[in-house]
Image (cartoon, grey):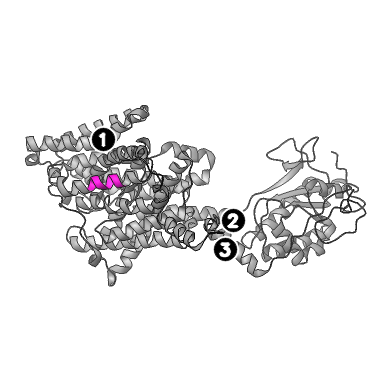
Amino acid sequence: MSPMDSPTHKDTERNQISPLDDEASPNAYKVAIPPKQNLFKEFQYTVKETFFADDPLRSFKDQTKSKKFILCIEAIFPIINWGRGYNLKKFRGDIIAGLTIASLCIPQDIGYSKLAHLAPQYGLYSSFVPPLIYAFMGSSRDIAIGPVAVVSLLMGTLLSNEIDPVTHKEEYQRLAFTATFFAGITQATLGIFRLGFLIDFLSHAAIVGFMGGAAITIGLQQLKGFLGIKSKMFTTKTDIVSVLHSVFASAKHGWNWHTILIGASFLCFLLVAKYIGKKNNKFFWVPAIAPLISVVLSTFFVFITRADKQGVEIVNHIEKGINPSSVHDIYFSGEYLGKGFKIGVTAGMIALTEAIAIGRTFASMKDYQLDGNREMVALGTMNVVGSMTSCYVATGSFSRSAVNYMAGCQTAVSNIVMSVVVFLTLQFLTPLFKYTPNAILAAIIISAVISLVDYQAAILIWKIDKFDFIACMGAFFGVVFISVEIGLLIAVSISFAKILLQVTRPRTAILGKIPRTTVYRNIEQYPEASKIPGVMIVRVDSAIYFSNSNYVKERILRWLTDEEAVKGDYHTRIQFLIVEMSPVTDIDTSGIQAFEELHRSLEKRSVQLVLANPGSAVTDKLYTSNFANIIGQDKIFLTVAEAVAYCSPKLDVNP
């Protein structure tokens, strides 16, 4: 037996093995006091774990200056790294995927630009420049970049609240470019300063509800084009009550049966194509090319029948040519600067949340790492450049990314291929879209957003966490019945409320002994677990801070009062309170003070306070604050079993 293993070894302050005292079990470990850390090291560790948990500079260690320079360039432009191993086989997969998503994105982009109240070409512009930038700077192999329905709707709603897109078209476009610029600045700033964890405050449940509500709102907005209702007869509001009132108010004179026939026919075609793709993954290309086929056929039908003379509204004109410069259109001063900043931050955060969620999903499916902060910089850069080239906010599209993945994309080159196809469309093919009916664009958007209503996810959320379900439904109904921005605000507010509730009201439990073991567990979870006569064992499942310390103290005292009320005679009176502290990751001065008050209250009741298994941070603060000496160092144990053993000479521990 080594000197440290000897039960007669002299006690020291930290890390030793010795009997706790004559009444405890022999050779038990004492709770070790962690080595002291100076303030600078503690601060350094906290900053590192908060902002640099992934150790982004680890590849730079022990490298020459030239190698470090190359690694730095590769960190900014990942294409240099993976491009070295690029080959013809990968290009074959990328070109097929790129052509497939291009056939999907072109009709979608024209429709989504209408959601943002912008001319059709701006949707195409946003699928030309941003994907090129992302291909060079992004770390995801599967994301397909371009306008998306939810962000387009959000932009259209927020922008139209400030400027009328019809009467002040030029100012509206300038504000859209300004918002896109600040959306990019927001995204890039979060990435550069490694603040990506902030987007995690918008919970999955809130996103599910927000996306579902936005999908309903987008679908309702398409009734205008789907039914052939004139713009002056249709509301500019997005809530379901206003939209449905507008739809039925125009039923007598506003609907056009030719338009309805075109829209309904091709919507059925699109839904059947989507069903075929879902039933058999081999036919993934069917729903991907169905929108383009719909556009071609409906355009040809309108052209040969001249249905536009019968009241069928058509796209009319799409500006030919690639993106013009919009550098001088961005508001860098004046009253619209602040408005553009506010809209840009909101749209940028939503776009970022969607892109990161999509990127992580497909990265996990292909088992590769996605650098979240690098993604933010890439997305931010492409939107900043996009704002200067007549684009509005672009991000990762789930539907296009899914098609990209199914089509066998290998790298971000698929985005380059898509961008080239959009470039050719802008240069040569836009006049062909003149007779495209608005009804087909509405049908394409409706078929695309249906999948955003994820009712299965909502059902699962209900089963798992009722509070999460409230957040989900709050966001959903906020978007559907009030507005997109209010729904978003409700989603964020409920997410924060959940965090505050969990922090201020942590879970606590009374523990009992599992039969024929020395294991102590929650008596509600394990009904067979038995309480120890004269001892109450409590576990706190959270860090103890100023926000919850008083609650923890009062919760323990209430339990003690209830227990004594049940067992009021002398023989079963509670004489020891054991607090299991292994889940307590940290404690602050308010927490220490709460424990001191708890100790004084227990002394008045002739109850001794015993602690079990505090972590290193908690142990350090217990000794630094002198609380360990107040209750007695011999009353701090490594396990609940040892704490119970300490009480055994006075109590019957074998119920």
Q: Secondary structure at mark 1?
A: helix
Give the farthest residue toward the bottom: 334
> Crowding at label 2, few (<14), some or many (≥20) Cα neighbours within 10 Å?
some
Q: Secondary structure at mark 3?
A: helix
- Labels 2 and 1: the sequence-earlier one: 1
In the rendered image, which residue does mark 1 sit on? Answer: 289
> Crowding at label 3, few (<14), some or many (≥20) Cα neighbours within 10 Å?
few
Asked if residue 203 lies left or right of residue 585, the reply is: left
**Relative depth, front residue between 259 and 189:** 189
Q: Secondary structure at mark 2?
A: helix
Q: x and y percent of residue 466 in the render? A: 52, 43
- Labels 1 and 3: the sequence-earlier one: 3
Mark 3–mark 2 distance (CA, rounded to whole Å): 22 Å
Q: Would residue 538 be seen by someone viewing this image from the given angle?
A: yes
In the rendered image, which residue does mark 2 sit on? Answer: 503
Q: x and y percent of residue 502 in the render? A: 58, 53
Residue 638: say if magenta: no
**Relative depth, front residue between 481 and 384:** 384
Amino acid at dot 1:
Ile
Amino acid at dot 3:
Val
The stretch of residues the image draws in magenta is 416-422
Residue sitting at 85 percent across and 46 percent down? Answer: 572
Q: What numbered label is drawn on residue 47?
A: 3
